[in-house]
Amino acid sequence: MPMPSHIHPTAIIADGAIIGENVTIGANCYIGANVQIGDNSVLHQSVVIDGHTQIGTGNQIFPFAVLGMAPQHFRYAGEPSTLVIGDNNQIREHVSMHPGTAVDNMTTCVGSHGMFMAGSHIAHDCVIGDHVVMANGVQVGGHVHIGDRCYIGALVGVHPFVRVGRNVIIGGLSKVEQDVIPFSRINGNPCFLDGINVIGLERNGFDRESIRHIRAAFKDIFKAEGGFDERVALAMKTHAGNQNVKDILDFITANEKRPIMQVKRHGQS
């Protein structure tokens, strides 16, 4: 196995750890025996990576980040659950990410090309997509699923088991307790559905026609007359054949036990 290029003499790397090529490990880092770190990654000083943790290539991990330590769960009994992190992420100071538990599927998965800002936390059994940005102090509870290209503002709290669809923007200080449809914008504490993430969609290559269809479906599902189930059924007929709208409708119907975040109705505080 090729030896890493730059390991500070004060770093502790337990026997059994697998370190890729051209990895930089700074002063006072600790790497546990069941850790794998991919090529071209950089660990700045005082990083702790333990447990059954797999980290891909090209990641930058900043001081005092703690990855793979035991999850904060009363029913965790030391099972060899895993934390899997993709490629080319920036994991900033004091970030914590925990492995899965036997309560779920034993794995926490974090995608690639993400930015996890200082003090953010990803709990056990979460699934985080690619190109996700979590601003400072975001707290994500256990079993949460977050889709690709989401932006989560500072100090947001996401309740356990919440699903967040892709291309969502969540305003800072929001309290997220219900599932959030793809392509949407939410704000508030408690938060509410505040429209479509038009700017985010434009930045990610959605053309005007695609955005027009998404906005029309949003109005039909959340602002038309009638009950929610009735509006969803009508949208399925009205927008049949549009893939983006299908993604929204599939998200809504995928788990009927989960509440879907709604718009703020007239008269609500």
Image (cartoon, rainbow, N blue to C red):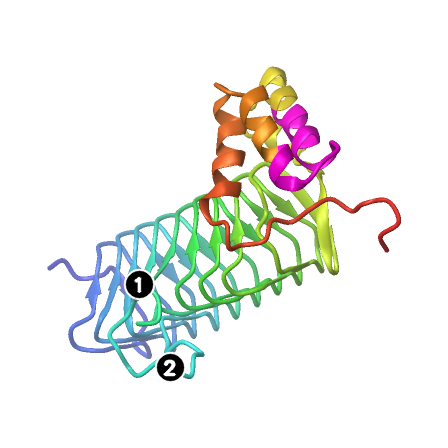
* Residue 18 drawn at (x, y percent): 19, 65
**Tag shown at residue 269:** none
Please name the residue shown 43% across and 44% down the image.
Answer: 130
Q: Which residue is mark 2?
A: 75
Can I make out residue 216 in this image?
A: yes
Q: Which residue is mark 1?
A: 105
Give the residue type that dot 1 points to.
Answer: Asn
* Residue 157 drawn at (x, y percent): 62, 64
Label 2 – label 1 distance at C-alpha: 14 Å
Q: Is residue 146 left or right of residue 38?
A: right
Q: Residues within 10 Å of mark 2 (few under 14, many from 20)?
A: few
Res. 9 image quadrant:
bottom left
Can I make out residue 205 in this image?
A: no
State whether the magenta stretch is mostly helix, strand or loop. Answer: helix
Please name the residue shown 86% across and 55% down the image.
Answer: 269
Give the SS element for disc 1: loop
Task: Say if the magenta span includes residue 222.
Answer: yes
Looking at this view, name the residue that lies furthest to the top: 209
